[in-house]
């Protein structure tokens, strides 16, 4: 039986333009596919357009996490950066190369009944868009490429640490950026100046696809060059353990390509191990049914009695490009890429209640808050009573109190094992009207 997947799109970061795709919405309703997301970062000044594709192979996190950072942590000032960070999303979440076979061998011909058909058609359309000047397809390949055979890790068949081109130049002589061999050589020279380990050095690997490599004729990059778009496969090594190191190589290479294409950008983190690690860990939030939000950064790996829709028509929204939700029977798993962040065990409620602004006394000051918001308190809080609402604070209990509205709840009254975060600081304040669930507000200890 097919698993039912759901994907929901997103509050775009302030600088990223979210492209809504009608098909994406349909697919989520039918629950059949996890669609890839697509970001267009366009500068105020027009210029060249670089298309970056991540995650065509689902077990290559360096490529798709690098693409996710491009989509959310970069701002383009001149030219355009378009990003499809998670092309093979179902395979990413399941950490497999290709759940329905190798997607990177489906670009020459694909049967209409192939499960990957719509995804491949959609990205082909984007590649062929007249605005796109260049395509980079990000991978983490096996081993470390060497011209001579040394062993099973270092050899001429290894893909790791290469810029892959299908041929030296585009066939149309004056095509912009058609000098692919020269560009790839410049980028690898630049990468090789700042290696984390001498073994990591990069090479240009020319597969001479047209004459020598039948399999590569079916690939995304070959599709691109036959449509006169210069294209590169970019491979870090699966044999490098640290995700942040792989991501750094991918990003350095893309930044170098943007410079060569005269695309001007800014990024909001430092391009070193710690800076990348921090950016990778910023998982953002998940919003559920517009009533409840969880901070994914420090969420417990299991949450129980989460008030979800009794009809199982919940709506989940992430601000991370790789956010996904998988239902397994009654349990709901939350993913960022291949990382399972948490599992929610629901308690089902009618969701008909909808309320806005409630008043909460926070350390002696009245605050007005909407469902899904968070407030920080130092000593205590107390929900200002409203006749129609019942309050339940998870982690607080007092004899004989069924409705905790109006009750002063001090820091010491909260039981850390019921917190939603691993540090024992964040607690759900749940609001109900009769038997309907209205939403939660999160109370966080300062
Ligand atoms: Zn790959």
Image (cartoon, rainbow, N blue to C red):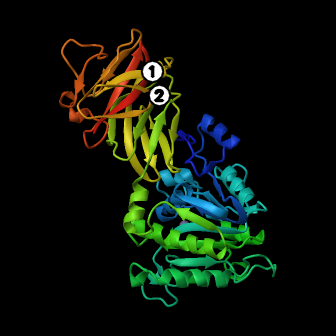
Residues marked 2 and 1 touching at CB (< 8 Å): yes
153 or 314: nearer the eye?
314
- Residue linked to disc 2: 291
In the picture, measured across the screen, residue 385 lies left or right of residue 415, that is right
Secondary structure category for the residue under label 2: loop
Give the percent coordinates (x, y) of residue 406: 29, 16
Q: Quadrant of residue 343?
A: top left
Ligand 1 within 8 Å of the CB at mark 1: no
Which residue is at a point 34% across and 42% down the rendered structure image?
299
Q: Quadrant of the C terminus?
A: top left
* Residue 426 seen anywhere in this rendered image of the structure: yes
Q: Which mark is residue 438?
A: 1
Q: Quadrant of residue 444?
A: top left
428 or 344: nearer the eye?
428
Which residue is at a point 45% across and 77% down the rendered structure image?
143
Secondary structure category for the residue under label 1: strand
């Amino acid at each position: 039986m097919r698993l039912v997947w759901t994907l929901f799109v997103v509050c775009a970061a302030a600088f990223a333009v979210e492209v809504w795709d009608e098909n994406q919405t349909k697919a989520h309703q039918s629950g059949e596919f996890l669609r890839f997301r697509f970001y267009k970062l366009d500068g105020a000044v027009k210029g060249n357009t670089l298309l970056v594709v991540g995650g065509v192979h689902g077990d290559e996190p360096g490529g798709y996490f690098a693409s996710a950072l491009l989509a959310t942590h970069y701002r383009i000032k001149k030219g355009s950066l378009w990003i499809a960070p998670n092309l093979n999303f179902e395979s990413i979440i399941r950490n497999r190369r290709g759940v329905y076979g190798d997607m990177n061998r489906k670009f020459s011909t694909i049967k209409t009944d192939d499960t990957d058909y719509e995804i491949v058609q959609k990205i082909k359309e984007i590649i062929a868009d007249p605005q796109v000047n260049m395509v980079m397809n990000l991978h983490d390949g096996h081993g470390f490429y060497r011209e001579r055979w040394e062993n099973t890790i270092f050899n001429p068949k290894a893909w790791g640490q290469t810029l892959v081109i299908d041929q030296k130049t585009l066939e149309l002589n004056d095509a912009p950026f058609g000098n692919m061999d020269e560009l790839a050589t410049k980028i690898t020279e630049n990468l090789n100046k700042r290696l984390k380990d001498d073994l990591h050095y990069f090479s240009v690997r020319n597969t001479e696809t047209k004459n020598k490599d039948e399999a590569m004729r079916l690939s995304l990059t070959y599709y691109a060059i036959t449509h006169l778009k210069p294209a590169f496969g970019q491979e870090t090594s699966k044999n490098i353990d640290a995700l942040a190191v792989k991501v750094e190589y991918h990003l350095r290479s893309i930044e170098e390509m943007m410079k060569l294409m005269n695309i001007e950008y800014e990024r909001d983190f430092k391009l070193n191990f710690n800076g990348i690690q921090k950016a990778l860990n910023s998982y953002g939030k998940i919003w559920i049914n517009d009533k409840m939000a969880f901070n994914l950064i420090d969420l417990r790996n299991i949450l129980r009695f989460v008030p979800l829709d009794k009809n199982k028509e919940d709506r989940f929204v992430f601000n991370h490009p790789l956010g996904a939700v998988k239902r397994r029977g009654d349990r709901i798993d939350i993913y960022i890429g291949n990382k399972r962040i948490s599992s929610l065990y629901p308690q089902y409620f009618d969701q008909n209640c909808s309320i806005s602004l409630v008043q909460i006394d926070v350390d002696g000051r009245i605050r007005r808050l909407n469902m899904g918001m968070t407030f920080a308190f130092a000593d205590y809080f107390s929900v200002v009573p409203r006749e129609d609402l019942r309050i339940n604070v998870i982690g607080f209990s007092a004899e004989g109190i069924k409705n905790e509205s109006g009750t002063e709840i001090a820091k010491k009254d909260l039981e850390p094992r019921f917190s939603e975060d691993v540090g024992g600081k964040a607690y759900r304040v749940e609001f109900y009207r009769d038997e309907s669930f209205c939403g939660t507000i999160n109370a966080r200890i300062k």
